[in-house]
Image (spheres, rainbow, N blue to C red):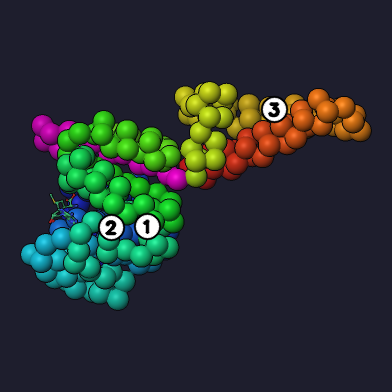
């Protein structure tokens, strides 16, 4: 099968896209990332978008040369404004400055509500991107540097869900760094068993304190279950 010869930077971006139905590549230019993702079965459908006509023509020609016009559509427009909510589960923004990346994300909050993964490769101002993600309840699950010649590129992968439900829980109670620990799953299970044990002991006790404690434990248990589920899917 003919494949585009991706540079290390583009290949690293593509490798960080989790399988999903539709991915949107904003500022696609050549459309090599959507082409590679579609050819390799990572996505069934892709939207290759760019604000300029030249890149869109280039993208169209490349998509046609891989016979993928049925699977990848091109859209001309500004940032994520080309997307409707619910259309793409993954969004890639690569090769733009960090400030512009944040501005595009900020302008399309409604679209992002239904996006599950962001794969960002800001050329500069990476700290602005991290800050935007933190402020907007996105959780950075991975960040890496890719070398191409003497240049280094940042790739930032963020997912929705984990931080929105359990921001305080992860940051304060569980400890964010433990998410990378091989014993994390085991530790979380042990904590949940502990909660269940206390809840059983409190069953039938009708004092206000016991009822409140049981309700709090129930919420805590649900939050831990949510974190564990998300962690297993990451
Ligand atoms: C340096 S190229 C990066 C191409 C490709 N994403 C990559 O990483 O190799 C940046 C592309 O982003 C497009 N672009 C710039 N501003 C944009 C915007 N507001 N919305 C969509 N695309 C934009 C440019 O036209 C250009 O094709």
Residue under label 2, please give it. Answer: 80
Mark 3 or 1, nearer chain start: 1
Query: Helix or strand or loop: what does disc 1 sit on?
Result: helix
Q: CA distance from mark 1 to mark 2?
A: 7 Å
For the point 56% across and 30% down, the residue is: 169
Residue under label 3, please give it. Answer: 190
For the point 45% across and 45% down, the residue is: 160
52 relative to 144, above or below: below
Percent across and percent down for residue 75 are 22, 68
Residue under label 1, please give it. Answer: 111
Q: CA distance from mark 3 to mark 2?
A: 42 Å
Left or right: 5 in relation to 205: left
Mark 3 vs mark 1: give the one in front: 1
Is residue 150 on the magenta stretch? yes
Left or right: 182 in relation to 200: left
Mark 2 Cβ and ligand 1 under 8 Å apart = no
Quadrant of residue 111 in the image?
bottom left
Left or right: 39 in relation to 218: left
Q: Which mark is residue 1?
A: none
């Amino acid at each position: 099968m003919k494949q585009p010869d991706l540079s290390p930077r583009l290949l690293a971006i593509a490798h960080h896209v989790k399988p999903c139905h539709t991915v949107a590549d904003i500022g696609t230019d050549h459309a090599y990332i959507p082409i590679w993702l579609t050819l390799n079965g990572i996505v069934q459908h892709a939207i290759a978008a760019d604000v300029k006509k030249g890149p869109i023509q280039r993208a169209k020609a490349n998509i046609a040369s891989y016979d993928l016009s049925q699977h990848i559509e091109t859209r001309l427009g500004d940032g994520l404004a080309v997307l409707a909510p619910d259309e793409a589960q993954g969004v890639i923004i690569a090769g733009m400055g960090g400030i512009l990346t944040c501005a595009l994300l900020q302008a399309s909050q409604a679209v992002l509500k239904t996006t599950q993964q962001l794969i960002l490769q800001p050329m500069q101002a990476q700290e602005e991107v991290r800050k935007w993600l933190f402020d907007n309840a996105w959780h950075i699950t991975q960040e890496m540097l890719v070398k191409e010649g003497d240049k280094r590129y940042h790739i930032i992968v963020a997912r929705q869900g984990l931080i929105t439900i359990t921001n305080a829980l992860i940051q304060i109670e569980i400890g964010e760094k433990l998410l990378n620990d091989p014993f994390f799953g085991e530790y979380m299970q042990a904590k949940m068993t502990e909660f269940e044990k206390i809840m059983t002991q409190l069953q039938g006790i009708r004092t206000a304190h016991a009822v409140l404690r049981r309700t709090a434990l129930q919420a805590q248990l649900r939050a831990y279950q949510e974190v564990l589920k998300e962690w297993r899917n990451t």
